[in-house]
Structure formats: structure tokens, C-alpha cells
Amino acid sequence: MILAHKNVTYDSHYVQHLVDDIKHKEYSPTSAVSQKFKKFQEQDLGLKNPHDVFERGRLYRRLWRHIGAHRQLYPELCPQ
């Protein structure tokens, strides 16, 4: 779900907030976890520039709204 937020990259303020304030760990863009997230975005998802990240976020947000609407229309088909 982290990819649905706008402009989220391994070194974005949002990721730094998650690590520092939510997980209560020290953030470092050179840490192994940050580098794995960078590799995942750039190599696995093919997100090479900010426009790619923005478009991927739009895709996930649209998908999330679509699933929410489907759950409202057909609650018996969607497991909780």
C-alpha cells in the first residue's frame, strides 16, 4: 500500500516518517532495507523517474477505489 502514496521513493519524506516515527528506528537512505526498496522500485517495478512513480501511485489509488466500490455493491463476494 505504500506505493499508492504520491511520490514515494526509498528516500522520500514519507518513508523517512514511517521509519523514524512509526517504526521508531533510525532512517538511513543507505541502509540495507532502503536499498532493497530502491531496487524493488527501480528493477522489479521499472520505476525509473518521478513520473513513473506518480503514474504507479495513480494506478494503485484507482484500483483501491474500484475494489472499495465493488465491496459496497457485492459484499457477499468479498471476504472480510
Image: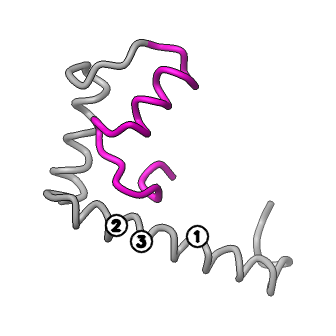
Q: Residue at position x 28%, y 35% from top?
A: 11
Residue at the disc numbered 3:
58
| Alpha carbon distance from label 3 to label 1 | 10 Å
Residue 20 point in image, percent of width and height: 48, 20
Quick check: is 64 in the magenta stretch? no
Crowd tier of the residue under label 1, counting other residues whose Cα lies within 10 Å: few below 14, some 14–19, many 20 or above: some
> Is residue 6 shown above or below 72?
above
Q: CA distance from mark 2 to mark 1?
A: 12 Å
- CB atoms of marks 3 and 1 within 8 Å: no
Any mark on residue 56, and which?
Answer: 2
Residue 41 numbered mark, or none: none
Looking at the image, is mark 3 or mark 1 nearer the viewer? 3
The answer to which of marks 3 and 1 sits earlier in the sequence is 3
Q: How far apart in space, not on screen, are marks 3 and 2 (Cα)?
A: 5 Å
Q: Residues within 10 Å of mark 2 (few under 14, many from 20)?
A: some
In contact (CB < 8 Å): disc 3 and disc 2: yes
Badge 3 element: helix
SS class, disc 2: helix
Location of residue 22 (image quadrant): top right
Judged left or right of residue 10, residue 60 is right
Query: Which label sits on residue 64?
Result: 1
Instruction: Decide: is 9 above or below 27.
Output: below
Image quadrant of residue 28?
Answer: top left
Q: Position of residue 15 (x, y in %)?
A: 41, 35
- Identified by mark 3, the residue type is Arg
Q: Nearer the viewer, residue 32 or 27?
A: 27
Q: Which residues are magenta?
A: 1-25
